[in-house]
Structures are given as C-alpha cells and as structure tokens.
Image (cartoon, helix red, strand yellow):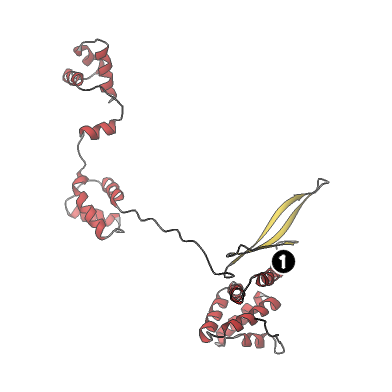
C-alpha cells in the first residue's frame, strides 16, 4: 500500500512513468496500472488485501464447514481431537491455523454470576485486625481488635483485645456468638445461627449434627440449643472431642455429650 502511494506521489510530481519505475523499484507495467486506478485513501494493507482478494487463501478455510459441524455436535471437544478428525479428512496444513479457526468458531459460554447468599443467621465471618493509633502527645500504639459479622444482615460486632492469640480468640468468639444470637430476631433465625456456629467446629460437628437431624427431624433444634450451650460453657475443643467420641460410639444427641463431659451437669430449659 505504501509503495502504491509512493508511485502516485511521483506521478503527481510530473515524473515520467519510466522514471517512476526506476525510482520506486516497481515494474513499468505496475506503474501504468497504478496510474489508471483510484488514489490510495488509507494505508491498511490487511483491509485492502481482503477487499481486493489479494494473496493465497489458507487451506484451512476449505474445512470450515466440517469444523462447524463438529462443534455443533460437541462444543467442548478438545481442539487436538478436532485436528485429528480434520486431518483424517485430508487437511495437510499446520495446527496453528486450525487452532485459530476452532477458537473463532467455538461457541462462547458465559458463566452465570452466582451470588453467595444464605438464610438469616446461617453464615458469619470472624477475624482479627489491628490499627495504629496516634495520641495527642505524639505517642503511637497498635490496637488489636476482633470483628464478627453476620452474612445476611451485615450485623457487625467489634471488641478490643490485648493480642491475637488463641485465648483471646476463644474468649471473644464466645462473647460474640452470644451477642449475635441475642441480636437475631425470631426462633428460626436463632436456631440457624446456633447451628452454623456449631458447624464451624469442623468435620466432626457436620457429621454429628447431620445424624441428629436425620434421626430426630422434629426435635433436632432442642439438641442444637443444648449443644450450643455446651459450646459456650466449655469451648470448641471440648465439644469437638465429645462429638468425635460420639461418632465412634454411634451415639448421637446432646444427652450423650452432656453425660460424657460431666455426669452431674445440668442445663436449664432453653427459652424458645
């Protein structure tokens, strides 16, 4: 395209066609042809070649129909398998051109956006944090805090702690659990929140509560209330070990956990 433009400029400057051919390095026949054509309006070689159908067509174009049929039958078929099938049909070109053709013809499937939602009191998030505080006298101090947030209502509770050790985690988490249960309105919401806090103990709690729900579908919430009370009074490690022992003995229920922890434990009736 630029060479055509060079020839046109030389012709407009008044040079003879033979001289233009010598200066531009183009044959005299090409100079005569360019002189009879429309002047160059842009320098996009690719667009001009497509418009004038210049150049040898790729051999992969003749197999376009076959590739379309293959992708209609199996949209997720591996490109390597498509290459094998096309070569069996006589394709002798390189794989790069075929891969580009397959990529342009393969249907684009957009993954739907799925929001992570849950029932009220079902999910909660907990973490430590810290912030640098500067006082009026110029001194600075690093303040540690522990934050909890309910997923559904976005209810947040923050407590200052002296450090980020396990003891601070256990004590503050128990306080936040009790406060969040009190803040959730409705019996259903409270039960879901208690169950979620129990499930956060890990795999033993998930298996143990699943067995309780399946065995007592109408009374499981009573076990959840009592197990949650044990969680608050004895901590997560004690309750987790009791659940693991219950799984080994195949005995499921809050009554077994209470008995295994301490024979004389008594729990007041939970207010529904």
| 259 versus 101 height, above or below | below
Tell me which residue sits at (65%, 87%) in the image.
260
Tell me which residue sits at (61%, 80%) in the image.
224
Tell me which residue sits at (22%, 46%) in the image.
60
Camera-nearest residue between 110 and 78:
110
Q: How many marks?
A: 1
Tell me which residue sits at (65%, 72%) in the image.
181
Please identify the residue farthest to the front as the structure is shown: 186
The image quadrant that residue 80 belongs to is: bottom left
The image quadrant that residue 183 belongs to is: bottom right
Query: Circle 1 sits on which residue?
Result: 168
The image quadrant that residue 192 belongs to is: bottom right
Badge 1 element? helix
Q: Residues within 10 Å of mark 1 (few under 14, many from 20)?
A: some
Rendered location of residue 23, percent (x, y): 25, 14
Rendered location of residue 13, percent (x, y): 27, 11
Rendered location of residue 261, percent (x, y): 68, 85
Q: Quadrant of the N terminus?
A: top left
């Amino acid at each position: 395209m630029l060479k055509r433009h060079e020839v046109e400029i030389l012709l407009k400057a008044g040079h003879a066609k033979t001289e233009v051919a010598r200066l531009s390095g183009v044959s005299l026949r090409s100079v005569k042809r360019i002189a009879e054509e429309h002047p160059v309006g842009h320098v996009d070689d690719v667009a001009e070649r497509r418009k004038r159908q210049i150049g040898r067509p790729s051999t992969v174009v003749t197999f376009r129909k076959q590739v379309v049929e293959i992708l209609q039958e199996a949209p997720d078929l591996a490109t390597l398998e498509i290459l094998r099938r096309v070569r069996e049909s006589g394709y002798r070109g390189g794989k790069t051109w075929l891969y580009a053709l397959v990529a342009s013809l393969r249907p684009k499937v957009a993954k739907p956006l799925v929001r992570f939602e849950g029932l009220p009191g079902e999910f909660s998030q907990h973490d430590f944090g810290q912030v640098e505080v500067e006082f009026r006298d110029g001194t600075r101090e690093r303040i540690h805090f522990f934050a909890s947030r309910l997923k559904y209502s976005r209810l947040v509770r923050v407590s200052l702690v002296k450090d980020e050790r396990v003891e601070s985690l256990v004590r503050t988490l128990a306080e936040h659990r009790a406060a969040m249960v009190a803040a959730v309105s409705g019996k259903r919401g409270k039960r879901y929140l208690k169950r979620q806090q129990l499930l956060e103990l890990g795999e033993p709690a998930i298996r143990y509560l699943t067995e309780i729900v399946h065995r007592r579908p109408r009374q499981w919430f009573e076990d959840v209330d009592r197990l949650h009370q044990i969680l608050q009074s004895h901590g997560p490690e004690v309750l987790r070990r009791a659940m693991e022992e219950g799984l080994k003995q195949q005995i499921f229920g809050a009554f077994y956990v209470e008995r295994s922890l301490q024979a004389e434990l008594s729990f007041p009736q939970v207010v529904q």
